[in-house]
Image: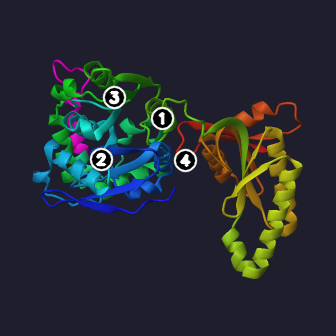
Amino acid sequence: MEMPPTRYAKTSDGVHIAYQVYGDGPVDILLSGSLWWHLEFQWTDPSAVRVKERLARLGRVIEFDKRGTGLSDRVPVDRLPTLEQRIDDITAVLDAAGSTSAVLLGQNHGAPLALLFAATFPERTRALILQGAFARFAEAPDYPYGFPERLVPRVVEQMESHWDEPHALAQIAPSSMHDPDIREWWTTMQRMAVSPGAALALWNMSMATDVRGVLPAIHVPTLVVHLSDDRLINIGCGRHLAEHIAGATFVEVPGSDIGWTDPTPVSDVIEEWLTGRQPESEVDRVLATVMFTDIIDSTKQLIEHGDREWKAVLDRHDALIGRALDRYRGRKVNPTGDGVLATFDGPARAVQCACAIRDGVAALGIEIRAGVHTGEIELRGDDVSGLAVHLGARVAALAGPSQVLVTRTITDLVAGSGLHFAEHGEHELKGLPGFWHLYSVDGS
């Protein structure tokens, strides 16, 4: 799905609010998200796009950057809007998008705004979905599941002095906090979305917000869905919402990563509740062996051979890979620079294929490196994703010239196949926790 154009709605007090509209489902869905975000930069992350694709199946989605953040007009940090002003911002966006009523999806810090709008404008609220949400963020004597007061100084110090570091990932996406690509993406998004001073002001405003008093006035169909191990918003906050909104449905979903990184579990609940039908599976998870190959010193080879001769070498290299994949029943997923990513339904055949490619390219005057790993992958049409794919790529990157490296999983699975391996030690793999025991394939 491609990024839609960014448009602007002008509020009654003259502030321009950036918004986007995508999807063509039967209902409008207004997303009231976190404290800060960036409408356009979010489209550079595949996980964020998958969330949007799921929502676009359900309705015409309307997203906006809150005033003072992202692509909306910046405002002085001492004049950040009240909840009442933000309600006016939502109204302006809905009017500009031509929406008379919408399903409100309030996520974490965007939930109080959605709650207040639903109570104030029930005629414009078809339904209310609260994801990882709260009516009050800060803890109180009668609200023990709020954010602990003792942790506030640390958060404030991080915002003021370390805004270029992804501290929030530990609460938002703990399984991804060590992935260097996600860490870089997150910190870039933060800098583009809001300044440190504005972030601190928004945080203080959220700490002071309490809309518990409006909950009895909400009479629209309401779903509350919450991750069981949500580290940002305690699940007690979600249970409190469901207990105090008449007729609300509460669903607890296992996990700790907010839907931005793994949209499937929460999105399934939302789709089933909103449509009344079980969601069709868009991701097949299977056990497979992944093989990565890459040509050694390809840039140096290009310089030495010249464009035309190097193209001829690459054509022969690609043809050799094609024959090897046919022989060992591999499926080519996509090229990876000067190599290939392929999947196999048997680990021994994957190792044998990597060795055949390694030995075959010697006649072309080049060398390759290869990595092989078995694990659960996600099939998305012709593409694959998942931890096993990332792990296989990292293993291949550690291999030397004419070397095929495999994980311990592979050696355990191919016992009795006649393949032989040599110890290659324990290694840290970029972006993956712990140490991984690797082996090199011994012989052809």
Label 3, residues with CA under 10 Å away: few <14, some 14-19, many ≥20: many
Magenta-colored stretch includes residue 14: no
The residue carrying mark 3 is 222
Rounded to the nearest angstrom, the CA distance separating label 2 from label 3 is 19 Å
Residue 101 placed where, x, y %? 31, 43
Measured along the vertical axis of the image, is residue 220 above or below residue 203? above
Magenta-colored stretch includes residue 155: yes
- The label shown at residue 271 is 1
Kind of residue at disc 2: Thr
Rounded to the nearest angstrom, the CA distance separating label 1 from label 3 is 13 Å
Q: Is residue 171 left or right of residue 80?
A: right
Rounded to the nearest angstrom, the CA distance separating label 2 from label 4 is 49 Å
Between discs 2 and 1, the one toward the N terminus: 2
Between discs 1 and 3, the one toward the N terminus: 3
- The label shown at residue 418 is none
Rounded to the nearest angstrom, the CA distance separating label 4 from label 1 is 35 Å
Between discs 4 and 1, the one toward the N terminus: 1
Residue 188 visible? The answer is no
Residue 30 visible? The answer is yes
- Display coloring: rainbow
Rounded to the nearest angstrom, the CA distance separating label 2 from label 1 is 22 Å
Label 1, residues with CA under 10 Å away: few <14, some 14-19, many ≥20: some
Kind of residue at disc 1: Glu
Q: Is residue 10 left or right of residue 389?
A: left
The residue carrying mark 2 is 100
The residue carrying mark 4 is 430
Kind of residue at disc 3: Thr
Question: Could you tell me which residue is drawn at 60 percent across and 40 percent down?
Answer: 282
Q: Which residues are magenta?
A: 138-158
SS category of the residue bearing label 1: helix
Between discs 2 and 4, the one toward the N terminus: 2
Question: Could you tell me which residue is drawn at 70 percent across and 64 percent down?
Answer: 338
